[in-house]
Amino acid sequence: MSDRGHPMLRRKAVESRLARRRRRERRFRLYCQIAVGCALLALVILFGDILRKGWSGFFQTEILLEVRFDRELLDPRETRDPEVLSRADFAPLWREPLKEMLGEPETRQERREMYALVSEGAIYGLRELVLEDPSLVGESRRLWLPASSEVDLMVKGRVSRDLPEGERPLNDRQLAWMDRLRAQKRIDVRFDTGFFTEGDSRNPVTAGIAAAAVGSFWAMLVTLLLSFPLGVATAVYLEEFAPKNSRWIDLIEVNINNLAAVPSIVFGLLGLAVFLNFFDLPRSAPLVGGLILALMTLPVIIIAARSAIQSVPPSIRQGAYGLGATRMQVIQHHVLPMAMPGILTGTIIGMARALGETAPLLMIGMVAFIVDIPEGPFDPATALPVQVYLWADSPERGFVEKTSAAIMVLLGFLITMNGLAVWLRRRWEQR
């Protein structure tokens, strides 16, 4: 009787173990789903906070004024000379119509408070208009001029009107003037094209990312031109030509793998010591930034290219050799085209990592205050991550939304580059 029960007992024991194993599998799957959900939730919270703070950075509050380009103020001798026009005082051009709309201030303090409604950047905008078209002298125009950062914050609702007068950027008198302009439909929130066309500024109203974006472009161009051919050539040599079981090759491979994990600040120190102090290259130039980022990206490209070359089936090489192809022909016409999807993916991911680096660029002086847009890799410039760092460290409230808007632009570049990597990989795989 006991012998007949043995198979049944063994069956029950197996079923019990299987049930426990399935329960553990379900719990593990649930833990994985919770982990993925937490990661997605954190990502949504991060992006949501950036969008909430940064969407208004692409817009600017402006005031509509009747500007009279007085000839006596700008060009009394009617010379139309750009030097004479550039030295003229443009402040009265918008101050007088502002006083006509809001009334003549009684005291000097009230006059300063009234003038504080319009940004100082209005002076530079009017000067550029006159220099581009001197025929405006003596005429009148209805122009939208940028409001001050304090007015911009109040109009966009970034600062509550219910706060005490000492805790908000505008006092009660200035709020009354702002409400009067709004009632006359002379205040509007418009898309800020200057955010994409202007350089950095101490004033958040006139600050833009053009200089930083162009600086990042030149640095990335130098990085790509150096790291991609060197990385691919190194990977081809190590996989196709280098002798196996060689101590020197093993040492090179170990160093390449170690360099891929070196902190970026170390590459910044290397660039400061070698490129600036030894070779005496220009400080804060995209050329030096590109050289440092190329050194940092090179190990990533080599590792990705080697993995892609190793994934090419040996039968492809054997078939090409069987048809009489040389080693260079096999590599050029068969191995590299088949490995190109992985090579391009690793390259673009490495470039995206380099685009977001800040520490090595700080070491070579690309943290400088740059207003002019660089025309080449040798001109002084900054980069988008450094621009974000500078704005985040500024005490003015108006730079908060500018910082978030610049982060959105930087994230847009990174997402575009990763999307390009996926598209190129699929395209080469289809080919």
Image: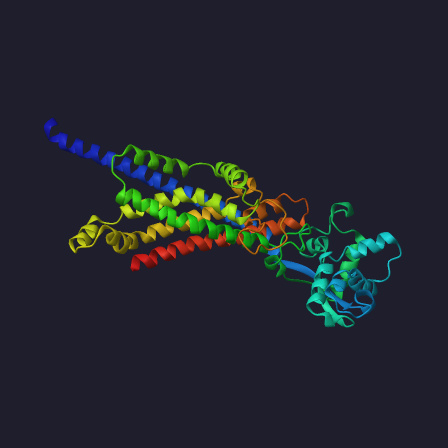
Percent x, y of residue 252? 34, 36
Measuring 79% from the left and 65% from the top, which residue is drawn there?
74
For residue 126, which quarter of the picture? bottom right
Q: Which residue occupies the extreme front position in the image?
A: 279
**Residue at 12% in and 27% down:** 2
Residue 271: image location, x then y, percent: 50, 40
Is 366 above or below relative to 184?
A: above
Q: Quadrant of residue 237?
A: top left
Front one among 91 and 134 = 134
- Work out which quarter of the rendered image holds the N terminus and state it: top left
Task: Tell me how the rendering is colored.
Answer: rainbow
- List x then y, in percent, for residue 270: 49, 37
Residue 387, visible in the rendered structure:
yes
Lateral position of residue 269 relative to residue 350, left or right = right
Residue 63 in view in this figure = no
> In x, y percent, where is residue 52?
58, 52
The residue closer to the viewer here, 114 or 287, is: 287
The structure residue drawn at horizontal position 80% and vertical position 57%, both measured from the top left corner, is 114
Q: Nearer the viewer, residue 31 or 183?
A: 183
